[in-house]
Amino acid sequence: MVDLLLGLQWGDEGKGKIVDVLTKNYDIIARFQGGPNAGHTLEFDGIKHVLHTIPSGIFHENAINVVGNGVVIDPVVFKRELDNLEQFDIDIKLRLLISRKAHLILPTHRLLDAASEASKGKAKIGSTLKGIGPTYMDKTGRNGLRVGDLEFKDWKKKYRALADKHEKMIGHYAADIIYDLEELEDDFHEGVKALKQLNFIDSEQYIFDAMASGKKILAEGAQGSLLDIDFGSYPYVTSSNTTAAGACTGLGVAPGKIGSVLGIFKAYTTRVGSGPFPTELFDEDGKTMGKIGNEFGATTGRPRRCGWLDLVALKYAVQINGVTELMMMKADVLSGFDTIKVCTAYKYQGKEIQHLPYNIENENITPIYTEMKGWAKNLTKLTQAKELPPALNDYIGFLEKELDVPIKIVSVGPDRTQTIHR
Ligand code: GDP
Ligand code: IMO
Ligand code: MG
């Protein structure tokens, strides 16, 4: 069986931390979609690590980490990640395997991303500019270059043809993009060299064999359900299926082989980049969340927009993914608020609704809040569920009842140890 761990909001829920916490229970950790737009943070022994492409189980000796076919890899970012890991004693060749079917992000994909965003003006997506959209476009357009191509002599010819085509496309955008392609390509080739030091595999076969021999697999999602290309707040989304179905296509796992679906959410909501966000706060409460929660993007450093928990959107994500267990992150950040608000319905076209409508643009929706009592207790030193303050237990109980799924982990700080199991 393959268990899934998925973000239920707009990303940055704390997936990296929880995958690291759970890796001791698994033999394989596999990323199934996204690319270096992701920034997964884990902290232990006083050191903070940020991973972009490499799965978050990499620091554990018991597990093999797989970058699946659904992931897009930028060799330049990938090499930087490998370089950062060098100081730690990790047998990377043994512990990290790459799918031959994963697509490569070319330097010109990044340029196309920049040109597309610049030409959109105010309507820009707020992309991380890592080349994600253009790379998935080439994948579905059947033009992409894949990791497996690097094992054949003619890959540079394929590369050139695609990069030349991209250069022409860049010229069509109404934006001036200044670049030195030779320099970018030098970095790309260095990255490819580093990537080629690793073992490339037919990952779907590897996963079939692992399942047949009873190995336990955890699929690590990137981004969040509301950034899903089909079910997210389109067009302000990423270019992959971030939801449970994405793990089937991104690893080659049959639907019947999916075990637990672990859904992870923050006790409030954040979003980085553009797009609708019904419960966004522009007041002191929002600022406090951002400050105490240290809400800055792990990939781009941009401040994250903050707001109260949106239960309408969370219910939707629980349904789309078939979540069987929930994990609530950053509960510590809400300590000190006199009142905690939860959005339990939307006012939409004059009516109160409890589902996510087609258009969740802020001007169409007014969130309706249920208020709950806050708690003052500092949670960051707590280790056991029985120590949680009553008002937090009420908040948890309310969410469990509304979502009809148990909350099994409450996270009270960024460190591996600041994790309470219920
Ligand atoms: P991911 O993309 O889902 O892996 O999440 P990110 O790493 O982008 O963002 C989560 C941020 O919150 C990181 O800086 C984590 O170190 C931090 N974090 C995770 N869990 C907690 C928590 O329970 N409390 C606090 N205060 N920070 C947390
Ligand atoms: P993790 O895995 C938060 C957002 C971007 C932008 C939109 C499209 O760390 O949770 P893209 O670069 O994919 O074209 O950007 O999606 N975005 C994320 N936001 N966490 C992420 O990943 C994200 N990856 C992309 O900010 O709004
Ligand atoms: Mg992140």
Image (cartoon, rainbow, N blue to C red):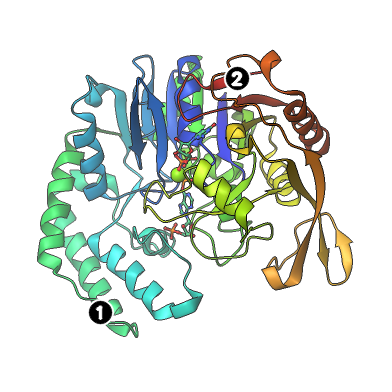
Q: First in sequence, mark 2 or 1: give its number.
A: 1
Secondary structure beneath label 2: strand
Residue 285 in the figure: left or right of residue 201: right
**Residue 242 in sight from this viewpoint:** no
User: Which of 142/70 is in front?
Assistant: 70
Of tags 2 and 1, which is closer to the observer?
Answer: 2
Q: What amino acid does circle 2 point to?
A: Ile
Tell me the residue that label 2 is attached to: 420
The numbered dot on residue 93 is none
**Residue 412 in sight from this viewpoint:** yes
Dot 2 crowding, Cα within 10 Å, few <14, some 14–19, many 20+: some
Q: What amino acid does circle 1 point to?
A: Lys
Residue 371 in the figure: left or right of residue 384: right
Position of residue 403 measured from the top left corner of the image (x, y, whole percent):
78, 37
- The quarter of the image holding the C terminus is top right
Question: Who's the residue at 45% across and 55% down the image?
Answer: 303
Position of residue 228 measured from the top left corner of the image (x, y, whole percent):
57, 54
Tell me the residue that label 1 is attached to: 168
Q: Is mark 2 within 8 Å of ligand 1?
A: no
Q: What is the CA distance from the residue labelled 2 to the residue labelled 1?
A: 54 Å
The residue furthest right is 351
Question: Who's the residue at 71% across and 73% down the image?
Answer: 363
With respect to residue 408, does 34 lie above or below?
below
Secondary structure beneath label 1: helix
Q: Which of the 4 quarters of the picture holds residue 119?
A: bottom left
Position of residue 48 measured from the top left corner of the image (x, y, whole percent):
35, 31
User: Which of 4/255 is in front?
Assistant: 4
User: Which of 79/327 is in front?
Assistant: 327
With respect to residue 62, does 144 lie above or below?
below
Question: Who's the residue at 16% across and 61% down the image?
Answer: 184
Q: Which of the 4 quarters of the picture holds residue 116?
A: bottom left
